[in-house]
């Protein structure tokens, strides 16, 4: 089993989250992941980076409670608002609906989305501390 550690003390926003993911998972690669949940999901399949060839991975997330707070509602609202203000192929109605749900306390935060993505990869065991 491969052991990998990400440290929530090293970031406090989404940009920092991706910097930590690149520091840990992409250290031996000549390229870095973009700030994309799809790219993060693809990484977890293990075709490149630190997960390449790993059958099972124990992912230790230090300071996960801090990350939960840092990547929570306000951070997620800011992230979604930035999408609304950026040119790109974004579904504006969906983003507005996601923002409304978060404001009502019903939507998924960035942190919750990341945990859902991790849960979709049975070869990855998340250990929180």
Image (cartoon, helix red, strand yellow):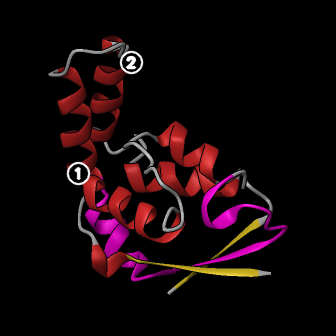
Q: Which one is in front, 123 or 49?
A: 49
Residue 69 highlighted magenta (yes or no): yes
Where on the picture, by quarter, is residue 42? top right
| Mark before the other along the chain sequence, 2 or 1 | 1
Where on the picture, by quarter, is residue 76? top left
Count of numbered badges drawn on the protein: 2
Residue that appears at 33% across and 23% down: 95
Please say if 50 is above or below 41.
Answer: below
Q: Quadrant of the N terminus?
A: bottom right
Query: Circle 2 is placed at which residue position?
Result: 94
Please say if 23 is above or below 118.
Answer: below
Identify the residue at the far right of this view. 55
**Spatial separation of the CA atoms under disc 2 and disc 1:** 18 Å
x, y (%) of residue 47? 72, 51
Q: Which residues are magenta?
A: 48-72
Residue that appears at 43% across and 61% down: 22
Residue 86 highlighted magenta (yes or no): no
Identify the residue at the far front of this view. 30
x, y (%) of residue 111? 42, 56
| The label number, if any, that marks residue 75 in the structure image | 1
Report helix, strand or loop for mark 1.
Answer: helix
x, y (%) of residue 12? 23, 67
Residue that appears at 79% across and 59% down: 122
Residue that appears at 23% across and 51% down: 75
Identify the residue at the far bottom of this view. 129
């Amino acid at each position: 089993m491969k052991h990998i550690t990400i440290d929530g003390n090293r970031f406090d926003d989404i940009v920092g989250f991706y910097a930590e993911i690149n520091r840990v998972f992409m250290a031996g690669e000549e390229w870095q992941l973009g700030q994309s949940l799809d790219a993060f999901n693809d990484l977890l399949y293990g075709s490149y980076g630190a997960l390449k060839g790993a059958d099972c991975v124990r992912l230790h997330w230090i300071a996960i409670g801090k990350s939960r707070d840092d990547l929570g509602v306000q951070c997620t609202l800011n992230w979604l608002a930035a999408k609304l203000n950026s040119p790109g192929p974004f579904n504006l109605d969906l983003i507005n609906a996601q923002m409304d749900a978060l404001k009502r306390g019903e939507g998924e935060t960035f942190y919750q989305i990341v945990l859902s993505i991790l849960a979709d990869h049975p070869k990855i065991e998340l250990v929180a501390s």
